[in-house]
Image (tube, rainbow, N blue to C red):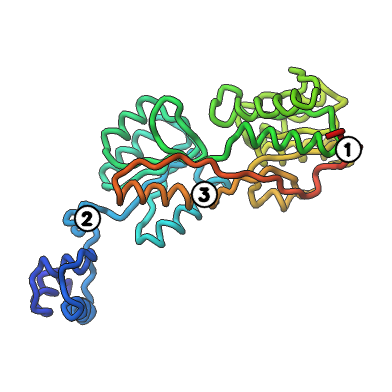
Amino acid sequence: MSYTIKDVAKLANVSIATVSRVLNGQGGYSKATEEKVHLAIEELGYQPNAFARGLISNKSNTLGILFPEVSSQFSSKILRGVEEAAHCLNSSVIVCNTASHGQRTMKYLQLLTEKRVDGILFVSEMITEEYYKKLESMQIPVVLISTESYQYPLPYVKVDDKHAAFTATDYLIKMGHSKIGMISGNKDDIIAGQPRIDGYKQALAQRGLAIKDENIIHSNGFSFHDGLTGLPKLLEQSPDLTAVFAASDALALGAISAAYKLGIKIPDNLSIIGYDNLPIAEMSIPPLTTVAQPLEEMGIVAAEMLFTMMNQGRRVESRIIAHSVIERESVKKLILYDT
């Protein structure tokens, strides 16, 4: 038999409104009353209807999170942080895989509207005018992760991509390299593409090293395949390079695979540094030196920011999370550059 909130109220000898307040932790009742309600719930085996409770409290206790690629290690690390924070605050997470397609993103935003989510986390994708108008119409808090919008006033959590790319390139210089190439993502990507290229160039310029177009390969994205095809092109253009900065770990791993096929030993013949510090980076041969984005921490921080906005109804400040170099075995130390 399926019992209702009315049955719980009758057995506990209280009003339906009191049972509702107990279920939603709203106060206004004694400890004895609370215990009677919980005993009645336990005796009847009553299961509160989350949707019905949401209608009363005007909360669904759910968040929506949109990823362009939900199966990637990048996304899974962020999701782990988000779910950890959400679990601690008694909320659930609805995960949406947009595949970077505008039409699919709009469909998911409509779905999240229908599910009455309390807030949205938007990961690693540019905010278009169409997305922003839809988000505005939902009238719920939104926090961006690993992306930002120059046009729309949405708080974000991310690493400073330009600074992190500068750090990666400068690390290679400090390890004695002066002939450094780059395999970048899409240069038209203003979030993670061009800023990482700018950081690479700034590091070279600051050390008085030449910036040459032939030392950069612009990929379509940040995938393993882009790195696999990118390294041979780069070395064909600039065969005297001693080191390469790859703008993602996937690019770096693709480059390491290409080097193996070309008979190039990493790091004896060519040093490679990546970007992200994904779990697979330490599994590669050799283990990949990389710039770490603390992805799990970014997920936790973003979720906590979202809950602050949901519970206090105020804007929060955007957060830049610190990056760091994780030294492994893919970079060889040459004669130190004069620092």
* Displayed quadrant of residue 171: top right
Front position among marks 2 and 1: 1
Q: Nearer the viewer, residue 333 or 336?
A: 336
- 34 vs 185, left or right, is left
- SS state under label 1: loop
The CA span between labels 2 and 1 is 62 Å
For this view, does 161 lie left or right of residue 237?
A: left
Is 134 above or below relative to 333? above
| Mark 2 or 3, nearer chain start | 2
Q: Residue at x 30, y 49 (%)?
A: 312
Distance, label 3 to label 1, CA atoms, is 36 Å
Circles 2 and 1, Cβ within 8 Å, touching? The answer is no
Say which amino acid is labelled 1: Leu
- Identified by mark 3, the residue type is Ile
Return the residue nearer the eye: 90 or 92: 90
Q: Which residue is mark 2?
A: 54
